[in-house]
Image (cartoon, grey):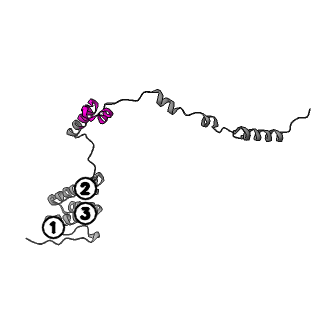
Amino acid sequence: MAAVTPSRLKALTRLRCAIFQTSYNPSSIRTGAKYLRARLRGPSMVQYYPPVINVAALARQYPELELVDEDEEQRLQDIEDRKRRGKGAPKKAKTKADSRRNQRKRVIVSNVLSSVACSFCFLHTSPSPQPTLSAARFALFAILACTNSLFIFTILHMLVYFKVPTLAPETGISVSIAED
């Protein structure tokens, strides 16, 4: 009896797959077809477990019963207690100006202003002229880094109040002082 050639076996396998509607996989690569062919388990599992009945669903379905959900009441009470202690969730920003990012910018600007005010207090009470100029320069550069014209305007008014004649000559900013 003669041996069957490999090409004839491949042709037979291809024909068998076409007849029985299976996938032709001559190299036996893992395709996951076994799992894709298997029946889905989800629907039978859902039918196995009974539906969960909760108080909120019953209260929505039958509002005339006026059911009270104790867990929900406790949750709302806890939220109210946290808010009273200052630990609640922050309010949602209605506009861009109300956002936390904008509040952070305002805090940074106020910190810069307070440091400048401290520098000017040092500048006003300083007995020697040398620390005066360095404190004033520090204050000016802190304000210029802030890049807000309103605050720079305020600082220039402070300079006039503290009677600082020239501030940081290399920047070209000077303040004219009006005598009382």
Quote the CA–CA distance across marks 3 and 2.
19 Å
In reply to whether residue 173 is colored magenta, the answer given is no
Dot 1 falls on a residue whose secondary structure is helix
Q: Which disc number belongs to residue 106?
A: 2
* Side of 76 where 21 appears, left or right: right
Residue 173: x, y in percent? 24, 70
Amino acid on which the number 1 mark rests in the picture: Val
Mark toward the start of the polypeptide (3 vs 2):
2
Amino acid on which the number 2 mark rests in the picture: Arg
Residue 101: x, y in percent? 30, 53
Q: Which disc number belongs to residue 160?
A: 1
> How would you rate the neighbour count of disc 3 (Cα within 10 Å): few for under 14, some for 14-19, many for 20 or more?
many
* Residues in magenta, as a range: 56-79
Residue 65: x, y in percent? 25, 31
> Which residue lies under the disc numbered 3?
140
* Side of 28 where 41 appears, left or right: left
Residue 60: x, y in percent? 30, 36
> Which residue is at a point 26% across and 62% down the rendered structure image?
143
* Side of 161 where 35 appears, left or right: right
Amino acid on which the number 3 mark rests in the picture: Leu
In reply to whether residue 58 is colored magenta, the answer given is yes
- Image height of 2 relative to 166, above or below: above
Dominant secondary structure of the residues highlighted in magenta in the image: helix
